């Protein structure tokens, strides 16, 4: 097993099964099931759209759900942790939390995460924090074919919108194999 076996994927409401359908619009990544579509790295607006001036002035809060999955056929990713880094100063605030469903089978036929009806629905059972390198959020050990839903909350703060606003979500853990 290596880092290539850990994938970050969009969520897809109403899919009926995880790891089955693709996700074409990041704005629809609102929980439910894990999509087959990976979140691209280093792409602006890969999960949230740009904060408009009216959203910024209204201090709009939006939510998105992504999955972290272990695609290795046999090995476990042990003691996974996540944290935020490189958050743009003066931009929108980003918070993360784990879905209440916890670690699930990647191809489950029951909902793998809370399913929001729109981007302003607060995911039930999720505790949001701003973990850093010194206060990492413990995800747990993700076995072969398993996944966990991660919710993100973005809060617009008012003032002037920032160009290329955002943050980096980082993970660590021990991989076997």
Image (cartoon, helix red, strand yellow):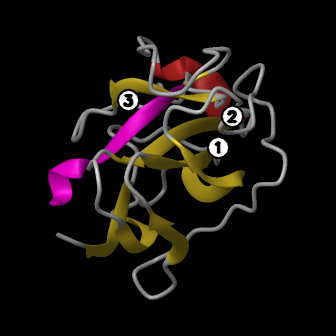
Q: From the viewer's side, name the closer residue of 27 and 66.
A: 66
Seen in the picture, residue 79 relative to 26 is either above or below; the reply is: below
Name the element at disc 2.
helix
Q: Residue at x 64, y 57 (%)?
A: 98
Q: From the viewer's side, name the closer residue of 146 and 117.
A: 146
Asked if residue 18 lies in the magenta stretch, the reply is no
Q: From the viewer's side, name the closer residue of 94 and 159.
A: 94
Q: CA distance from mark 2 to mark 3?
A: 20 Å
Is residue 48 visible to us here?
no
Seen in the picture, residue 41 relative to 32 is either above or below; the reply is: below
Pointer 2 residue: 57
Mark 1 closeness class: few <14, some 14–19, many ≥20 residues within 10 Å: some
Which is nearer the N-term, disc 2 or disc 1?
2
Asked if residue 2 lies in the magenta stretch, the reply is yes
Q: Residue at x 41, y 11 (%)?
A: 24
Give how far across and how far down residue 49 sits, in percent. 47, 25
| Quadrant location of the N terminus in the rendered image | bottom left
Pointer 1 residue: 158
Is mark 2 in CB contact (under 8 Å) with mark 1?
A: yes
Judge left or right: residue 61 versus residue 149: right
Q: CA distance from mark 3 to mark 1?
A: 19 Å
Label drawn at residue 45: 3
Judge left or right: residue 75 versus residue 106: left
Q: Quadrant of residue 172?
A: bottom left
Which residue is most to the bottom? 134
Q: Residue at x 40, y 35 (%)?
A: 9
Is mark 2 in CB contact (under 8 Å) with mark 3?
A: no
The residue segment tinted magenta is 1-11
Q: Residue at x 54, y 75 (%)?
A: 138
């Amino acid at each position: 097993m290596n880092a290539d076996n850990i994938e970050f994927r969009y969520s897809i409401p109403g899919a009926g099964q995880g790891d089955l359908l693709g996700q074409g619009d990041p704005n629809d990544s609102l929980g439910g099931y894990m999509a087959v579509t990976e979140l691209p790295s280093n792409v602006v607006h890969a999960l949230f759209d740009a904060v408009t001036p009216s959203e910024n002035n209204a201090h709009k809060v939006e939510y998105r759900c992504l999955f972290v999955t272990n695609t290795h056929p046999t090995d476990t990713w042990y003691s996974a942790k996540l944290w935020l880094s490189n958050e743009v100063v003066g931009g929108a605030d980003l918070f993360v939390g784990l879905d209440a469903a916890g670690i699930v089978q990647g191809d489950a036929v029951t909902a793998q995460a809370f399913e929001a009806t729109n981007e302003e629905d607060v995911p039930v059972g999720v505790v949001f924090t701003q973990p850093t390198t010194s206060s990492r959020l413990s995800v747990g050990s993700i076995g072969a074919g398993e996944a966990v839903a991660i919710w993100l909350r973005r809060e617009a703060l008012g003032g002037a919108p920032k160009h290329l606003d955002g943050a980096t979500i980082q993970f660590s853990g021990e991989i076997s194999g």
